[in-house]
């Protein structure tokens, strides 16, 4: 009983599970937001309701990461689930950043040839 009591009273540091990996996800998400706003500005499609939905998605990504922290602590896999989640977010946001660069007009056809044609290359086809 004493051991269980001490376990609940001990402070838990999220840094022990996550480390600096939150900053990687945060950097990619912020860079995607900035490039998305630049692309919308270039296309003259700045819309607050679309931006609002996008921000809700970004908050959802952090909620998913927080959930992975708890799952990681429960299963005791020493940060593996969190690193997997951050890796998936980095891949998703990286693709979005590349699409945004294409929408801005930066020529990166060697990367965008693998992407959905409806999302990239619109600026060059007008």
Image (cartoon, helix red, strand yellow):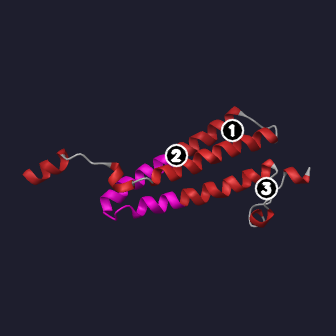
Image spot of residue 68 (x, y percent): 41, 55
Q: Residue furthest top?
A: 48
Which contiguous range is marked in magenta? 61-87
Q: Nearer the viewer, residue 110 or 43?
A: 110
Label annotation for residue 120: 3
Indicate which disc, 3 or 2, sits on the residue closer to the N terminus: 2
Within 10 angstroms of label 1, few (less than 14), some, or many (20 or more) residues? few
Within 10 angstroms of label 2, few (less than 14), some, or many (20 or more) residues? few
Disc 2 marks which residue?
60
Q: CA distance from mark 3 to mark 2?
A: 25 Å
Disc 1 marks which residue?
50
Image spot of residue 36 (x, y percent): 70, 44
Image spot of residue 48 (x, y percent): 69, 32
**CB contact under 8 Å: marks 1 and 3:** no
Image spot of residue 17 (x, y percent): 35, 56
Tell me where residue 43 sits by quadrant: top right
Residue 8 is left or right of residue 100, and the answer is left
Q: Nearer the viewer, residue 87 or 54?
A: 87
Residue at horizontal 71 percent and vertical 40 percent from the top = 37
Residue 95 is left or right of residue 3, and the answer is right
Q: Residue furthest right?
A: 126
Q: Residue furthest left?
A: 2
**CB contact under 8 Å: marks 3 and 2:** no
Residue at horizontal 71 percent and vertical 56 percent from the top = 98
Q: CA distance from mark 1 to mark 3?
A: 18 Å
Residue 18 is left or right of residue 38, and the answer is left
Kindly state the secondary structure of the residue where label 2 is placed: helix
Residue at horizontal 52 percent and vertical 52 percent from the top = 25
Kindly state the secondary structure of the residue where label 3 is placed: loop
Magenta stretch secondary structure, dominant: helix
Within 10 angstroms of label 3, few (less than 14), some, or many (20 or more) residues? many
């Amino acid at each position: 009983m004493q051991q269980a009591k001490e376990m609940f009273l001990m402070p838990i540091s999220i840094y022990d599970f996550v480390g600096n990996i939150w900053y990687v996800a945060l950097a990619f998400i912020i860079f995607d937001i900035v490039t998305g706003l630049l692309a919308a500005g270039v296309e003259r499609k700045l819309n607050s309701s679309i931006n609002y939905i996008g921000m809700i998605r970004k908050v959802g990504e952090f909620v998913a990461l927080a959930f992975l922290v708890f799952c990681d602590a429960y299963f005791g896999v020493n940060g593996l689930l969190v690193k997997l989640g951050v890796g998936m977010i980095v891949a998703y946001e990286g693709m979005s950043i590349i699409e945004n660069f294409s929408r801005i007009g930066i020529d990166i056809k060697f990367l965008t040839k693998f992407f959905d044609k409806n999302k990239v290359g619109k600026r060059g086809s007008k």
